Amino acid sequence: MKDNVVADYVTSFERDGYVMMEDAITSEQLAALNEQLRRWIDESRHHDSNFGEIMDGRPRFDVEPNTHGPETPALRRISSPIEVSDSFLAVTRDNAALDLTAEIFGPNIKLLATKVNLKLPGSGTAVKYHQDFPFEPHSNDNIMTVLIFLDDVTPDNGPLEVVPGSHKDKIHTLWHDGVFTGAVDPEIEDGLRDASVSCTGKAGSACLMHTRLLHASLPNMTNAPRSLFIVTYVAEDAVALSPNPIPHSHDGEIMRGCYTGRVRSTPYEMDMPEYPKEASFFGQQDKVKRERGQNADHSGLILG
Ligand SMILES: O=C(O)CCC(=O)C(=O)O
């Protein structure tokens, strides 16, 4: 990347808390990821509920309970795909968004987590407003969520909605009435929606997002899929203060630079997260609704 291009990206990121990058992965990488994803979606047709297993015993492949079937696969989350796919591991270790992350938070960068979030046609998946930081407390907040577009993301197929500049404001609690809902107070949602912008772009682009940026996404209203490969990179001197919500065998692997063995701490206060018990936060959202006597629907969070 040319110096002036990097400087523009860094300026946007510092001001807005996110930056869109075209060609974050090569066309060969994109083709390899999508080929693997197609095989997983096909495999899901043979399962009528969640399947596979990650390190803590939770399922790796999460399907939407009411709509998933052999003819209408509704795979919505794959946790730690890098443990079961060399293509996903190779992209995690080498992509242009990682290079930019090293320019912004570097030079030393390690891996926290990976996941695929899918919104296949006909699925009702939505994500409520939240910041990622309360799910992943560290000694400092130099944490980047990189959302790589595996499909073209359009205004109607459930793009990420971000609130520019919100990474400089308060850290919101995700606990309400003693329940970890994974979402901010519903009373402020309307204001956040008015302040949001949609992150759209071609397959192969990426959105690089600060861990404190407020964001959400709406359901896919089209017949085209919307799949994201989401990688969380962390400054090497940011030390985790709670267990990794998606534990995996590459946790802490150095992605750029080197291991220094140092810790850098910055002052802040927030609530500790609840360790996820469900395959993804969809299940948790449904559980919250059941406890409150409301009907469960398909919307929910796909974090954790
Ligand atoms: O998949 C999406 O639309 C949103 C993902 C998200 O909110 C996150 O990874 O924090």
Image (cartoon, helix red, strand yellow):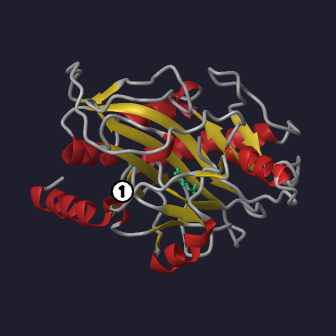
Label 1 SS: loop
* Residue 106 higher or lower than 154, as above or below: above
Percent position of residue 51, x then y: 78, 31
Name the one closer to the observer, 287 or 156: 287
- As drawn, is 171 to the left or to the right of 298? left
- Ligand 1, seen in the image, is in the quarter at bottom right
- As drawn, is 118 to the left or to the right of 21? right
Q: Tell me which corner region of the image, top left, top right, bottom left or bottom right, holds residue 188.
A: bottom right
* Residue 187 higher or lower than 141, as above or below: below
Q: Tell me which corner region of the image, top left, top right, bottom left or bottom right, holds residue 23.
A: bottom left
* Residue 79 higher or lower than 157, as above or below: above
Crowding at mark 1 (Cα within 10 Å: few <14, some 14-19, many 20+): some
Give the farthest residue toward the left.
Answer: 3
> Which residue carries the number 1 mark?
23
Name the one closer to the observer, 96 or 9: 9
* Residue at point 25%, 66% (across, down): 15
Cβ at disc 1 under 8 Å from ligand 1? no
Give the farthest residue toward the front.
Answer: 177
Give the farthest residue toward the bottom.
Answer: 194
Number of on-image labels: 1
Q: What residue type is labelled 1?
A: Asp
* Residue at point 61%, 61% (across, down): 128
- As drawn, is 40 to the left or to the right of 236? right
* Residue at point 46%, 52% (across, down): 147
Considering the image in quadrants, where does the C terminus appear?
Answer: top right
Percent position of residue 136, x then y: 46, 39
* Residue at point 54%, 39% (across, down): 273
Percent position of residue 124, x then y: 75, 63
Percent position of residue 240, x then y: 39, 29
